[in-house]
Image (spheres, grey):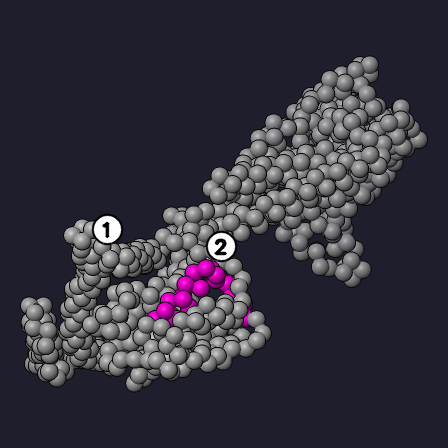
Amino acid sequence: MKKKRILLHVMILVLTVVCFGTGMYGAKHYWSVQPKTYYAHQFQENYKVIMREVVASAGKQYLYRRDFADDNKILVKGEKENITAKDIKVIYRDENRKETYYNKIESYSWSDYDSLSKKQKRRYEYWAKLAKYMTEYGIVYDDSSVKSIMAGNDEKSIKGKSQGNTQYSITYKVGGTQYRYVSDFDYDKSDKLIDQCILEYGEIKALDDKGIMKNLKVNLRDFASDMEEQYSTDYASDWNSEWSDFSQDIEEILNNIKVCNFGISKNMTYDDYTHQLIEKYNDAPENLFENERYKLMVICICIATIIAALAMFIILMAWAGYRKKSGSAGLHKIDKLWIDLWLILILAAGAYGIPKMLDILASYWNTSNQLVVNIVMIALGIILVILVEMVVLICESFVRRLKYKSLIKTTLLGKICSGIKKAVSYILLNTKTSILTIVFGVVSLVWMLVALKMAANHKLIIGVIMTIVLVIAVVTIIVKFVCEYNKIADGTKKIADGNLDYKLEEEYFFKMNKKLKDGINNIGDGLSKAVGESLKNERMKTELITNVSHDLKTPLTSIINYVGLLKNEGVESENAEKYLDVIDKKSMRLKNLTEDLVEASKLNSDVITFNKEKIDIVQLINQSIGEYEEKFDEKQLTIIKNIQEEPVYVMADGRRTWRVFENLYGNIYKYAMESTRVYVDVKCTEEKVYIAVKNISATPLDFDADELMERFVRGDKSRTTEGNGLGLSIAKSIVERQDGEMKISTDGDLFKVEIVMNKK
């Protein structure tokens, strides 16, 4: 059984690995697969995002060159003060001046323009322009593509950082001068670029309108709303207010962009998202029809392995706890552990570990770092196998505990509940003592608090007196309890010294001591009873030895005597035949006694195996009565049967059950009064069969009926009959070994045997 269990465990784990491996392989190769159109869309959307960012950076350069490249350029004209580009830069860096201007602008924030005077309107327009340029400078100030221009290196071509593998070149016009914003890669080397795009008639189009670039078209005006949103959030300041409307500036920027060139470097970086999309596009199928077929195969394999594992799991649960030799349920050492604590720890580990691993797996799933994906998948598989094995072990342990009816006892919750139950039972058992103890404790605490309060309120004498009274009360109770306990201890010592009739008669104040006294008195009674039973057993052993000796000695003596007569008189003597007949009978009696003694010993030691089968007990009883009819006729014993004709089936060993009735009828033949009746009754219920055999004894039944089922005890105390006193003992053992019950009762001279057996 153990080897089979281990094999099933291994098979379940193998199926778990197959299911997990197949599922992960399918998820990696079939579920995450998308058609070419999907990756083409992702690629083009990514391309558009890069285009928008590059155009936005070029637009910031345009704004700087238009408004801030010349420090002396007057941006805001006023009646008293003109604001130049240099002033804007200085104000931007001076927090105090910026705060001053901000407060002035704020004073017009909630004004109604139409209600203002001409002078106020001029001031309003002055501060509005200042706010607009401050906001605009805030946008371009932090852009890396403008840094070289701000530093005074105002070249016609400004190099920017490549957007991953995407290279670009944008030409825009400021005034009458053209400027170029180009990636750090030399864009003019077009032979090293793929998937190139150019600007034609306001639209950016692919040079080669095939494959991943198919149908790629984007109008520069499509970037307007995105650029406006980006500009409005780039400069997070209170200057960014109702005056910061970039729509007009963005339109101007787009109108002045003359050339747009984009392309992907052939020497791509593997980790770049663009490269990954191109690779996935090249590997992706045109459609997913074939992929769906493989997905169905993966699902079928996973379902088949799960069903097979469940079938093995069910078999394992059916075998759990049964031992090959005894066939009964039993616990293992592991079942002594608290199963609920086990379960909590495993659930916690699974609830934390598996989602964590899945998160890591998901984060790397679509990346190029497949080594990490494979390591995480292997780790996840190992964790899953361990969890499956732990769950199987827990389920086995759970089933074993159920079969052994010890589930509650072997759980932490059960232990806690059991402890609470014992505590509550103890409190309820000693309710009065518990209540009195709690009340006394509360009263003592209140008493001491009052005493301390008195002492604190300059009533020291009263506080001391109250404390002394409390101490005297506590000492008195303790002394009384100890005195009662010592008296009980003395009484216990007297009983332990052998005075089993000693009783603790005194009344005690504490209920706990009263119960202890009653328990000790009961122990004395129990010891007296045990001693009486021991003496009785010793007496029965003595009688048993005496009876066995007598029953063996009588036939053996006869055999020896008659063998001696044969030796003296010779075989030719006329009495030789009579002597041999006596020797034969005594030998057979000695043989039967020995066989019965051996059988009784085997029955009591459970050596004999019973071959139980479905038998008709009614037919068996009728046949056994028929076998003994001639013997009963010798003593004129009349059989009165009260037996139904319909079959009644029981699970029993037919040959040994026959021996039961054979022993009963043999007992009747030996001890029944002649010319009387023998009653055999059979009654049935839904589950039981009741068999009763009654007869009238030839001698008075002046002894305990239960003694007749002891070995070597006979109905005639003089032991003059042919019996050996084993028949009823053997019959009782046979009935009990077949899950039945046999009882003997007497009423005057009436002797009655009752047998109860289970119906099939």
The C terminus lies in quadrant: bottom right
Q: Secondary structure at mark 1?
A: loop
Magenta residues (range) = 648-667
Q: Secondary structure at mark 2?
A: helix
Residue ID for mark 2: 399
Q: From the viewer's perspective, is 87 left or right of 585?
A: right
Query: Residue at 30% across / 69% down in the picture?
Result: 709
> Is residue 144 shown in magenta?
no
Q: Nearer the viewer, residue 206 or 608?
A: 608
Query: Residue at 54% across / 47% down in the picture?
Result: 316
Q: Nearer the viewer, residue 642 or 116?
A: 642
In this rendering, is residue 290 above or below 502? above
> Is residue 658 shown in magenta?
yes
Q: Position of residue 621 (x, y in %)?
A: 48, 70
Query: Residue at 54% across / 67% down in the picture?
Result: 616
Q: Amino acid at mark 1?
A: Val
Q: From the viewer's perspective, is 680 left or right of 47?
A: left
In this rendering, is residue 538 above or below 204? below
Residue ID for mark 1: 571
Q: From the viewer's perspective, is 237 left or right of 448?
A: right
